[in-house]
Amino acid sequence: MLDPYPTPETKTPSLSSVYALSKYDQERMCLMIGKAYNIPTVALRFFNVYGTRQSLSNPYTGVLAIFASRLLNDNPVLIFEDGNQKRDFVSVLDVARASRLALETPEAANDVFNIGSGNAYTINEIAAKLSEILNKEHIFPEVCAKYRVGDIRHCFADISKANKILGYTPQVSLEQGLIELAEWLQGQTADDKVTEARNELAIRGLTV
């Protein structure tokens, strides 16, 4: 069995969706323009960002917001594949801190940095943690065993470069971040559109 490893900035891009292509194009264009016009430019690659004030009614936003929307409406979270795929979840507070460091560090100019937590969690673990903290443990997730075309099995950040050059070290643990998120979610309402998004993916042949 193969063991997954953190993704470094040097990994050769494998662009299997328009979404991935657009992000990479924007990064390259910014760096090219910065170099051409002598504008100090830094590209930050954010992994799965979560936190308060994130849209709860957009079925294409971050997975934690989508799961929260489902649970707030007493619906089971929808998990693709077997739920053992690994992702890196980083607090928006750490993302804001990393952005400030990128602005204040001259050595960062014209370079690319991963910004994540440096930890990997399975989607099953994330669903269980959020259900527990929202007191929704009685709502069991739906593991659909479907694969979304363009998804990758594992994706979590190697943040050693950001640590070395920017001095970036994540300060918000997942447990702390989820507590803050749960407190904000109290009193929030969410328009759960996951079913519609799921049906659209199926119609377009993007789940197999």
Image: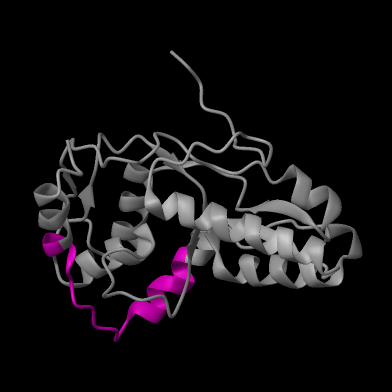
Residue 128 in the image: above or below residue 42 = above
Q: Quarter of the image containing the N terminus?
A: top left
Q: Which of the 4 image quadrants contains residue 130?
A: bottom left
Examine the rendering and report whether any part of residue 58 can be seen.
Answer: yes
Residue 18 in the image: above or below residue 187 = above
Residue 24 on image: x %, y %: 55, 52
Residue 107 on image: x %, y %: 90, 58
Q: Quarter of the image containing the C terminus?
A: top left
Residue drawn at x 36%, y 65% as measured from the top left: 61
The residue most toward the front is 36
Examine the rendering and report whether any part of residue 47 can be seen.
Answer: no
92 horizontally vs 79: left or right = right
Q: Residue 193 or 89: which is nearer the viewer?
A: 193
Image: magenta residue range: 178-196
Residue 35 on image: x %, y %: 81, 61
Residue drawn at x 80%, y 63% as measured from the top left: 36
154 horizontally vs 131: left or right = right
Q: How is the image coloured?
A: one colour
Q: Residue 103 or 134: which is nearer the viewer?
A: 103
| Residue 29 lies in the magenta stretch | no
The residue most toward the right is 106
Residue 33 in the image: above or below residue 140 = below
Residue 128 on image: x %, y %: 31, 50
Residue drawn at x 18%, y 41% as measured from the top left: 207
Residue drawn at x 70%, y 52% as measured from the top left: 113
| Residue 185 lies in the magenta stretch | yes
